[in-house]
Amino acid sequence: MMNKPPRRGRRAGSPDTRAQILDVARRRFLAEGYQAVTMRSIAAQADVDLALISYFFGSKKGLFGAALALATNPAERLALILEGEVETLPDRVLAEVLDVWGSPVAADPLRAMLGGAAQDPAVGTLVSEVLQREMVDRIAARIGGADARRRACDFAAHLAGLIMARYVLRLEPLASLPPDEIARTHLPPLRLALRPRPASPRPGR
């Protein structure tokens, strides 16, 4: 029986090819940032045709988002957190933030996401849309009541400020405080942000 000749050209599309592209893309984005990495260079390093990346991911932004999702999926983790009691939601969310951002494996892709958002307005818009849909809207739906989305947005804004100061800018002494100290300082305003606001008095009363 004759041996088959070796296949010429680059690999055809397959789940393994998709995983290889994502592995290369994630390492390149983390090492070089969003702006410096091109789809063509990723295709060359992954040994696939450039058209395959467009086929699997549509665009560089699509590839960027898919590559980051390999490390952690905040939407899925938030969905689990939301299943608990509303009264302790701030405690669970803050604990999750401290856990995820305290792990280099999970935090490095998130830092890359923030860097890409800062460098490219299109990526910034994409990240904003995802955060609003997957975080703010879900929290608003869970807490319910008057002004739910406003309260959820205030809650998210406080978390974003904490993440930026502690994990991105690494401001001291905040960056070095233990989790229990962070919780002692930041849980009260997080709880306040989600608390229903009293109705404004009507004019003339």
Image (cartoon, rainbow, N blue to C red):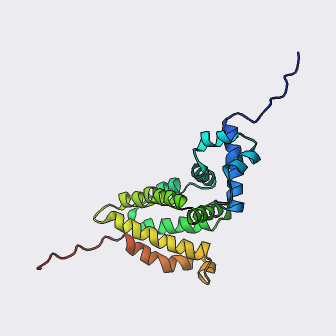
Residue extending furthest toward the right: 2
- State left or right for residue 179 relative to residue 187: right
**Is residue 195 shown to the viewer in this render?**
yes
Residue 83 seen by the camera: no
Give how far across and how far down residue 5 sits, in percent.
85, 24
Residue at coordinates 54% horizontally, 64% vertically from top-left? Answer: 96
Q: From what the image shows, is residue 141 above or below residue 154?
A: above
Determine the residue positioned at 50% across, 55% down: 75
Q: Residue furthest bottom?
A: 173
Residue at the left extreme? 204
Taking depth in this image into account, of 153 and 7 the one nearest to the observer is 7
Q: Which residue reaches farthest top?
A: 1
The answer to which image quadrant residue 143 occupies is bottom left
Tell me the quarter of the picture where residue 173 sits. bottom right
Residue 135 at x, y percent in the picture: 45, 59
- Location of the N terminus by quadrant is top right
Instruction: Answer above or below: position of 142 versus 9.
Output: below
Judged left or right of residue 171, residue 79 is: left
Image quadrant containing the C terminus: bottom left
Residue at left offset 68%, top offset 56%? 37
Give the total number of marks visible in the rendering: 0
Where does residue 130 sit, x and y in percent of width and height?
Answer: 48, 56
**Residue name at image x 80 percent, y 30 percent:** 8
- Tell me where residue 15 appears, x and y as whole percent: 66, 37
Q: In the picture, residue 35 is in which quadrant?
A: bottom right
